[in-house]
Amino acid sequence: MRSYTLIAPAKINLYLEIISDRPDGYHELAMILQSVDLADEIYLQSLDTESICVKCNHPQVPTDQSNLAYRAAALMATKFPQALAEYGGVEITINKHIPVAAGLAGGSTNAAAVLMGIDLLWNLGLTKSELEELGATLGSDVPFCIAGGTVIATGRGEKLSPLPNLDTIYIVLAKYRSLEVSTAWAYKTYRQEFGNSYLRDSENLAARAAAVHSEAIVKAILNQDPGKIAAKLHNDLERVVLPAYPQVLQLRELFASFTGVLGTMMSGSGPTVFALVESEEQAEAVKLQMRAVIPDQDLELFVTRTITQGVQVA
Ligand code: ATP
């Protein structure tokens, strides 16, 4: 085959706990990550030369070497130079639907799709765990985007333990197009403001990582209980992002006040806020209610749902 199209889904964080800082500058995390059906399409086409090029329909996404999809292809080219010589380089076309810089792993899922697609284009036959290992060198969320579904992620987010598939839960996402929150800023500020509480425990890191405080939400997931899952949503980064970004706080408070919303939380380092809702009809109703309160077209709203897989060939 000379071309492949891949579907690259976004993720939300049902749970994000910062356990400790780490010597490498990252943080030791305990997260529960969930794939949703809001997805980008990635079209890969073999080239006759050994070059890599990226095209994207979204003006905010760079198409140079800083694009995570480009970096994924460059990684494959470095690891498998013979395959590059035999099969040629690749043109990557990204059709963006996932909001950019949103806490939804948009870049990571594009990179995951490129790794999986080049594996197919070059007949490499890599296993999922080999692809996840390669993905971890590009970004903490990339292995999850390959694995997909509902997963406990520890370490800096790259160590994955799958949970059973969730029955479909409908979700409304809200994000101000022009609002960006730097992930690095969010973690740095959290560490400055709340680091003392966990730094004391850093010698006890392994024990703390094992005793993740997420038992209640894990139990709710195992019991397929959306109400309890929604009641146990948690994100430590809300402690720094909500006070600094009143618009994010407002979205969260509005979602919480709407009928049919089971629970609401910010995803990752934000600024996307999501709401878990009882049904598809109610998700559409919640979206309409939000639009009625905030008619500003800068606010993007999506109805999506939980899915059980990560990146897939279309
Ligand atoms: P995460 O949830 O993993 O922290 P995010 O959803 O917050 O990710 P991205 O959408 O991945 O953030 O974008 C972060 C930045 O990365 C953007 O500002 C953009 O310039 C850059 N970027 C590089 N490659 C991509 C890509 N393929 N898609 C989107 N953004 C990209």
Image: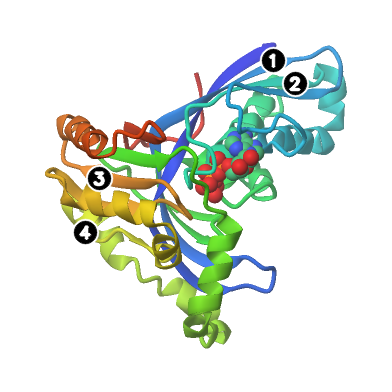
Q: Secondary structure at mark 1?
A: strand
Alpha carbon separation for disc pair 2 and 3: 39 Å
**Amino acid type assigned to the residue bearing label 1 in the image:** Gln
Dot 3 amino acid type: Leu
Q: CA distance from mark 3 to mark 1?
A: 37 Å
**Residue marked by disc 2:** 90
Q: Earlier in the sequence, mark 3 or mark 1?
A: 1
Disc 4, disc 2: CB below 8 Å?
no
Q: Say whether mark 3 is within 8 Å of ligand 1.
A: no
Position of 29 with respect to 168 (left or right) is right
Q: Earlier in the sequence, mark 4 or mark 1?
A: 1
Amino acid carrying label 4: it is Ala
Q: Which residue is mark 4?
A: 231
Callout 1 crowding tier (Cα within 10 Å): few <14, some 14–19, many ≥20: some
Q: Which residue is mark 1?
A: 45
User: Which circle, 4 or 2, is nearer the viewer?
Assistant: 4
Q: Residues within 10 Å of mark 3 (few under 14, many from 20)?
A: many
Q: Disc 4 or disc 1, which is closer to the eye?
A: 4
The disc, 4 or 3, on the residue closer to the chain's N-terminal end is 4
